[in-house]
Image (spheres, rainbow, N blue to C red):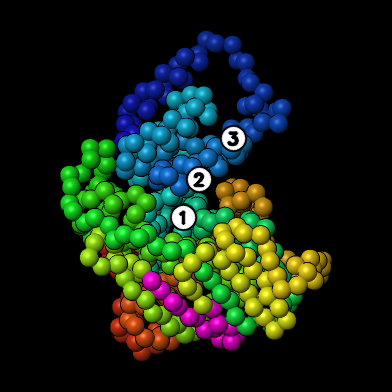
Amino acid sequence: MRSGINRRRFLRGSAGVAGACFGMPALVPSSVLGLDGAVAPSEKITVGFIGTGSHGIHWNLRAYLAQPDARILAVCDVDSNNLTKALTQVNEKYGNQDCAATKDFREVLDRKDIDAVMISTPDHWHTLMSVMAIQAGKDVQCEKPTLTIDEGKILIKRVREAGKVFQTSTEDRSLDMYHRMAQLVRNGRIGKLQRIEVILPKQPNHAGDPTPQPVPPELDYEMWLGPAPYAPYTPQRVHFNFRWIWDYSGGIICDWGTHLFDTAQWGNDTEHTGPVEITGTGTHWEGGLYNTVKDYDVTYKYANGVVMSCTPGNPSIKFIGTDGWVGNRGWRGRLEASSDEILNSVIGPDEIHLYTNPAGEHRDFLDCVKSRKDPYFPVEIGHRVATICHLGNIAIKVGRTLKWDPDQEVFPGDDEANAFLSRPMRSPWKLT
């Protein structure tokens, strides 16, 4: 049974507002007409928010509330504490009580007056919710990554069949240091690219407490689990820490790899393909709740000869070529290079200019909803980046070098590795 939006109450409220308008002077505010620099309501993109945890509120919701041509009509979260925070922020911004709230995302998708959704849920929900939103006629911005490689392939198919706009949600391509880094590499400023060094953050220093506890009254835990296997509730299973549990995510390699691997793919001009060989070693959390990769050392080899390494430390990326290197140290760290000539090089008008939007992922998505063009991180490229994350995890799990066919997206003749390309969903949820 669905909880949240009471349609009868919603309709009664709407009828009351409409009835109050009869007999009143027809005074129309200039903002309704789009005057004085305001965006007319008819020109605004209506948005539903699914997932209003920390990142959903402090990054995505905040960004959308700052967009003059977006209007948030509904918020959804399985935790009523998160839901109340989001609802309060929206109503305070708009100065009314018009925003609907629900714990069931399907009620957001049922709304015919919502154009697009912003999905900020745990990874195990990303693809299923996105596909259901697309089937409901919505454009979609969804947090990264997918849960499996096969899920990503299904997502691409559904997006393209429906002709919807889909933005894989990260800010990296709008950040100057990563955009310029990729452009310098693509335009040959470091000579022929040979190696890419990717460093991801270190993991938590504890394995999590698996002791079952009563489900708190504010949480719809069954909906939080959704398509994932049933497991008893414990506080460290949900919200931020889902990242370290295999049933819901792929650990640090998926959480952070989607960021830095995207810049690597961008600079390597391999956005629509991937590596052909992967070797990974590492350990997994044991003896507690967490079971994703703990320590890791992964090497990827591409058909063009480029070798990419991935190790833990201070999140950084470095491109090394025959004539020098370019990169940065630390998340959003300043751009560095082996010479001032490379660092200060000007990209000419006839050279490669990679598409970006300095205003960020949310602005880019809204612009593309209007233009119907692909955003800067479209579904195919997001899938290929997530695939690199999954390939690293799979290589560590099987404990040997893997061959990968990026065209067919399989491990040729390797049943053990191919078994990790998909995961079953718990009934009644299914991806079609």
Q: Is residue 30 above or below residue 103?
A: above
Q: Which residues are magenta?
A: 295-308
- Quadrant showing the N terminus: top left
Is residue 350 on the magenta stretch? no
Q: Is disc 1 surrounded by few (<14), some (14 to 19) or many (20+) residues within 10 Å?
A: many
The answer to whether 372 appears left or right of 46 in the picture is: right
What's under tag 3, amino acid-wise?
Answer: Ser
What's under tag 2, amino acid-wise?
Answer: Asn
Q: Main secondary structure of the magenta part?
A: strand
The earlier-in-sequence mark between 1 and 2 is 2
Q: Residue at x 43, y 50 (%)?
A: 120
The earlier-in-sequence mark between 3 and 1 is 3
- Quadrant showing the C terminus: bottom left
Dot 1 and dot 2 residues touching (CB under 8 Å): yes
Residue of label 2 = 60
Residue 298 appears in which quarter of the rendering?
bottom left
| Inter-mark Cα distance, 3 to 2 | 23 Å
Residue 198 appears in which quarter of the rendering?
bottom right
The answer to whether 280 appears left or right of 141 in the picture is: left
